[in-house]
Image: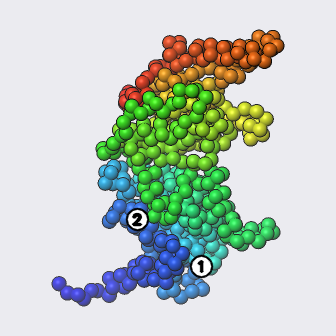
Amino acid sequence: MTDDIRPELAAWRDRVARTLDEHRAEARAKRHAKGYRTARENVDDLADAGSFLEYGQLAVAAQRSRREYEDLQSNTAGDGIITGTCTINAAQVGAERGRAAIIVNDYSVLAGTQGFFHHKKLDRICELAEDLSLPLVMYTEGGGGRPGDTDVTTQIAGLNINSFSTWAGLSGKVPRIAVNNGYCFAGNAALFGCADFTIATRNSWIGMAGPAMIEGGGLGKFDPTDIGPIAVQEKNGVVDVVAEDEAHATALARQLLSYFQGPVEAWTAASQEVLRDLIPEDRRWAYPVRRVIETIADTGSFFELQRIYGRSVITGFIRLEGRPLALIANDCQQMGGAVDSQAAEKAARFLGICDALRLPVLSLTDTPGFMVGPDSEKAGAVRSMSRLFVAGAGMTVPIVAIFLRKGYGLGAMAMTGGSFVRPVYAASWPSGEFGGMGLEGAVRLGFKKELDAVADPAERELLYQQLLARMYEVGRATEAAAHLEIDAVIDPADTRAVIARAFAAAA
């Protein structure tokens, strides 16, 4: 062996080295000074070790006519985007099911802006993802379109590109997860918003225009940190999950992707007997439904989306005996579990994505129905709540429904795919109660004449309570099961086993 190598190989090595963090020390230092990671550090953390295959590494910005080529090789490495294929979570799900593609916008290159070759690389990996059925994880930090690519002389506005439609066109075909840290404006924000699932760090600002565009449009002068801070974008549902930093966001992306990569062999679960006592004996008291979810689910497998948006309906993922499931559940600590417009929109979108990506759905239902009243109608209740029926009617994956307590009215039907007969199995805990509307409203409406006829307030209240107790007895879970409106009443401690058998029968 000799240490001498041919000149073309040496030149190639030098050329590749210019794209790496070791050569771009100043850019790396700037990132670290802000507490951020480099694009390649995120790639290394996301992809399984040794699995990343890069595409377009030697690209530079289309600015050869205005800058020295060696400068472009280092300072516009990859034209501001790293793309490639890899495996993610292969140790848990196997190499075949762990196949994935990665897109990382590199903010250290021209503020992560999107140039001519940047778009070509983005299109190439998206097209491969569709052809090879690869899930995609994209890091979106960047400032949108780039006006300085002087080598491109055959376009005017540069709007005849495919990147946004190519990325959006993957909807329903492969899972797409967007991860953001830092500034994400204009075209980068459009990519972020098109994803199926969005994760952002607390140091994220996400907006459809950055400061320059806003000021140029005559809308005022703003700092970047004034535009789409995380507190705003989490509250309005733009961000599904908030991470502490890029390392946490990457770990969350790996976990989120895993639910679409199939079952795992290793799992544990909590003792199920505690489920018997999680519902208060007093039907008027609320309880923390997340404790129910975490007990039913494999230990540590519950992954919640949009926790503070549409709060009366919980959406997320769990595993049951290693099998991934989508989950919707009513939170009776929020508006009694009533489904309002935000919750309906949230649940409908979630169900549509999970159905397209072939993930079965578990519904844990405890709702007095849809939220009603003038304020609800101002929020577009008719359209929003109806979308939940449309989503349920269009679903092709199995649904299993477990009624924890209340199953009233249209809202309860919407939580189970649009009808109690839609699930492959619909069972209730003994605490379940059912009716065409909430019991209290049913008594006041159905027995208004009788109640109004009682002059004495104390006697009227006594009559009301007697009628309410009678309605409760009629609508108990056992009576609903006896009339075949649900399939069964089950011991809460058997819930995991029942759900597993129901999905196994539907497989």
Seen from the viewer's position, the closer of residues 220 and 268 is 268
Residue 22 found in image quarter? bottom left
Q: Can residue 369 be seen in this view?
A: yes
Mark 1–mark 2 Cα distance, whole angstroms, equals: 35 Å
Q: What is the three-letter code of the residue carrying label 2?
A: Asp
Q: Is residue 358 visible?
A: no
Front-lying residue, 109 or 202: 202
Of helix, strand and loop, which one carries label 2? helix
Q: Name the residue under label 2.
A: 45
Question: Where in the figure is residue 287, as x and y percent of width and height?
Answer: 55, 36
Helix, strand or loop for disc 1: loop
Reply above or below: 87 against 291: below
Placement of the C terminus among the 4 image quadrants: top left
Left or right of 206 in this view: 269: left
Residue 242: x percent and y percent? 55, 56
Identified at 70% across, 22% down, the residue is 441
Tell me what residue is drawn at x 62 percent, y 39 percent: 334
> Residue 281, percent across and down?
53, 26
Residue 151 numbered mark, or none: 1
Q: Which image quarter is the N terminus in?
A: bottom left
Residue at 51 percent of width and 86 percent of height: 71
- Amino acid type indicated by mark 1: Asp
Asked if the residues shown at circle 1 and circle 2 are in contact, with their CB atoms under 8 angstroms apart, the answer is: no
The numbered disc on residue 375 is none
Q: Say whether disc 1 or disc 2 marks the residue closer to the N-terminus.
A: 2
Quarter of the figure with residue 378 = top right
Q: Which residue is drawn at 58% across and 59% down?
A: 191
**Label 1: how many Cα within 10 Å (few below 14, some 14–19, many 20+):** few
Vertical placement of 398 versus 291: above or below? above
Q: Which of 480 and 112 is in front in this view?
A: 480
Q: Where is residue 319 in the image (x, y as percent from the top left)?
A: 40, 41
